[in-house]
Amino acid sequence: MTARRTLLTAGLAAAAAAALPGAAAQAQTYGAYAMAYFKESPNLTDDSYALHLAVSADGLEWTPLNQNQPVATPTAGMQGLRDPFLLRKQDGTFTVLATDLKGRVFNLNNQYIHVWDSADLRTFTGYRRVRLHALNTHSWAPTAFWDPARGQYGVVYSAHNGTRDVFMVNYTTDFVNMGAAQTYFDPGFNVLDGDVLRHGGAFYLAYKNLANGNLYVARSTTGAPNSYTTLTGGLRQGSAIEAPILVAANSGGSFWLWGDSFSPANAVFYAWQSTNIAGNSWTALNQRTFTAPISSKHAGIVPITAAERTALLTRWGAPNWNRLKSYNFPDRYVRHASNVGRIDPFPMEPPADQQWRLVPGLADSAGVSFESVNLPGRYLRHVNYAIQLATGDGTAQFAQDATFHRTAGLADASWASFRSHNFPDRYLRHSGYVLRIDPLSSGSSATDRQDATFRVTY
């Protein structure tokens, strides 16, 4: 009888978990990551003030979903968003928070934020604007964390207290009824973009110091307002940085701190890694090690299960195009400009110049040809060994010139190199940032092999 009751109890528990997809996910081991972001490009051609999603198996290489198009768009307030944030709630489902802003003209006195509920990030329900305060100030970059001592979620956001920029917090259980706003972090100087990570019984707050433009990480044993002590000495990559994100690696023992550049003209993500989040030992990551989605800005990252990642790819789809990142200039991508193949720094205008459909080789289906996304019917081909973008003319010569065979990367076997179909001793490479095909072999110089090595990414 006892065994039967045990089996019955286990069966009821399993059924309950199945009825609550979030709860089932919460009990599993996280093996992937989801990212929320909005988009901006230098000349506004790729701007999108809506919710975008990407997924990653390793937390570094990101696959934008839905062809890098929105999965949800605000319909109230300013009808646009910035700074989206993903929170896994205690029941395993998700809440999405975002700043109520559209475009690059900032409303300094918006008391509201956008909120969605989601069981699985495949659908978004309960859209609403939530009022956080009645102050004459903004509500920017909302993030949230679970405070077990209170049994509530803390919603942290940037605001002005009449003297300087600080972080405010409202406590809630449902993201509908918000508690009174109170100061969460005021170090005595202006701060922006706070992100709280609860780990190992402590709370870690990443923020930007507006006085010097650097990112910092602070620690609290309780997570209570005004209880943080700054740990780091200040971090920066690039000329300007903001929007820090703290992420604990699913594999354990490692942490990432993400940030992105302030200016849309240089919309680049940067990252650091540490094995000791409580210390002052962050190592900047080379951009060779990660790839963020095109035009992505001010992201939020949350761990998900491998099954959730698969479900999101099934629901929204991976891009039907790729990008080619240079191995030795990882801030540069293969693009066409004035019908010339070259590598240029990201971001670039128009962004679609760097997007390629890798189709079966025109001369040999075992190979590959690179068709332009924004100029369909045009392919990369070599003419006198120089790479051009040209319209396919149906000739055998064009097909051969536009066909390449993918091999293990000459500088790194986990990357890729591309051998010419009709000049099989020559490989696609850059020289002076311009693409051409040159003879290469295992005996070529390290620089030559690196010039001919690319990552096929999104």
Image: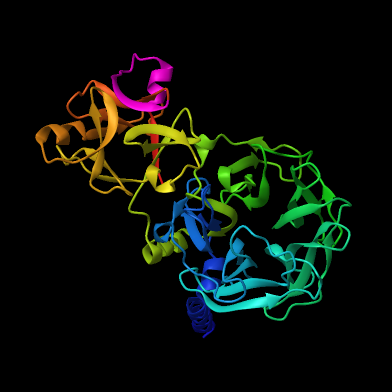
Residue 254, percent from left and from top:
63, 44
Nearer to us in this view, 246 or 387:
387
Determine whether 421 is above or below 174 in the image: above
> Residue drawn at (54%, 75%), measured in percent from left and top?
75
Residue 398, percent from left and from top:
16, 34
> Residue drawn at (59%, 36%), measured in percent from left and top?
285
Residue 149, percent from left and from top:
79, 69
Magenta region includes residue 335: no
| Residue 177 at least partly seen | yes
| Quarter occupied by residue 311 | bottom left
Residue 272, percent from left and from top:
63, 40
Q: Is residue 393 left or right of residue 249?
A: left
Nearer to us in this view, 136 or 205:
136
| Residue 267 at least partly seen | no
Magenta region includes residue 448: yes
> Residue drawn at (73%, 56%), measured in percent from left and top?
194
What is the span of residues highlighted in magenta in the rendered image?
A: 433-452
Q: Is residue 399 left or right of residue 20?
A: left
Determine whether 227 is above or below 457 in the image: below
Nearer to us in this view, 374 or 13:
374
As drawn, which residue projects farthest toward the bottom? 1
Q: Is residue 88 left or right of residue 457?
A: right
Determine whether 422 is above or below 94 in the image: above
